[in-house]
Image (tube, rainbow, N blue to C red):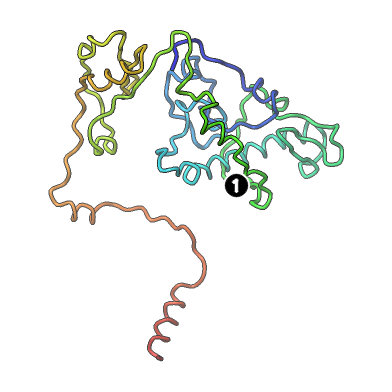
Amino acid sequence: MSDTDTLCFSRRDLLKGGGALVIGFRIAGAPLPAAAARGDVAGPPDPNAIDSWMQLDTNVSPNQGATTSSSSIHRGGPQVRAAAAEARQALLALASTRLGVQTGSLTVSKGVVSIDGHPARSVTYGELLGDKRFDVKFTGTAPQKAINRYKLVGTSVPRVDIPDKAGGTYVHMQHVRMPDMLHGRIVRPPGQRAYGAGAKPLSIDESSIADIPGARVVRKGDFVGVVAAREWDAIKAARALKVTWQEPPPLPENLFDSMRAAKTTDTVIADWGDAPNAFAQAANGACDW
């Protein structure tokens, strides 16, 4: 964590570099104010607009739930793939107009669209879109790449990096040092129930870390953290900072009855075959033997 200037570049520059389509996040509608573009102002974005998924600032991104248990790809990947497919269709439509052929005559490789059989006639994603918005609705109906056409997912990649990692040759993030660099720690509410209820800090006693050199509080909305020039000072400050958290709602007196009465959401994962007929046959078969 550093308070030095951050590296900034436009989407046009990003796409021009390799022609690749980068899926991130962006608020839809009118252009974002400068503060929101930097992430100082949180969403909410319109998840039904392709432009909501086409920037790299997760502070103004669609909420795809928690990032836990290595399940992010399983839970959030389908939406990202669907958004990428929709954006690809929009880019192919632009390329069709630019190159004067139907979309069925176009091929894409590494973000470069070309006419099948005439690779010299091509255009990159960056040249097609630049800094403009898609202004396309996210319908989720665009065709996605078939699994048998995957080139990277599911392949076995030789881990030639393991020896240097094990030997400490690589410089890890923990070893990086920058001018005026600060170390940070998140200050969390106690107990697991606070996370489910969305605990809010009611008050913060900054004087509780006054004896730790250079330590100071960072707060954005309900986020509370501390920073310090030395990592150990940041650790001590996170432990010492006195925060009064909003009390989570108490558990019901009769937990079982409350759980039984709670509203549920049924989700159909797969639906095929004739279940009633299958059950009827199973019952008859049981009687026969």
Residue 176 drawn above or below residue 95: above
* Rendered image quadrant of residue 139: top right
Horizontal and vertical percent position of residue 17? 69, 23
Q: Element type at marker 1?
A: loop
At 22% from the left and 18% from the top, the residue drawn is: 204
Give the side of residue 231 with respect to residue 10, left or right.
Answer: left
Pick the front one: 8 or 214: 214
Q: Quadrant of the N terminus?
A: top left
Viewer-proximal residue, 138 or 151? 151
Q: Work out whether 253 lies above or below 178.
A: below
Horizontal side of residue 18 vs 272, given as left or right: right
Which corner quadrant holds the C terminus?
bottom left
Identity of the residue drawn at 71% across and 33% down: 111
Q: Residue tagged by mark 1?
A: 141
Give the left or right position of residue 210, taking residue 27 as reference: left
Rendered position, 144 above or below 130: below
Q: As rendered, which of 61 and 159 lies closer to the eye?
A: 159
| Mark 1 residue type | Thr
240 with respect to 266 (left or right): left
Seen at 33% across and 22% down, the residue is: 221
The residue nearer to you, when weighing 143 against 111, is 111
Q: Position of residue 282 (x, y in %)?
A: 42, 81
Q: Residue furthest left?
A: 253
| Furthest-front residue in this view | 167
Q: Tell me what residue is drawn at x 53 percent, y 45 percent.
A: 78
Q: Residues within 10 Å of mark 1 (few under 14, many from 20)?
A: few
Q: Count up the numbered dots.
A: 1
- Residue 225 in the image: state x and y as whole percent: 32, 20
Instruction: Give how far across and how far down residue 206 sits, in percent.
Output: 23, 13
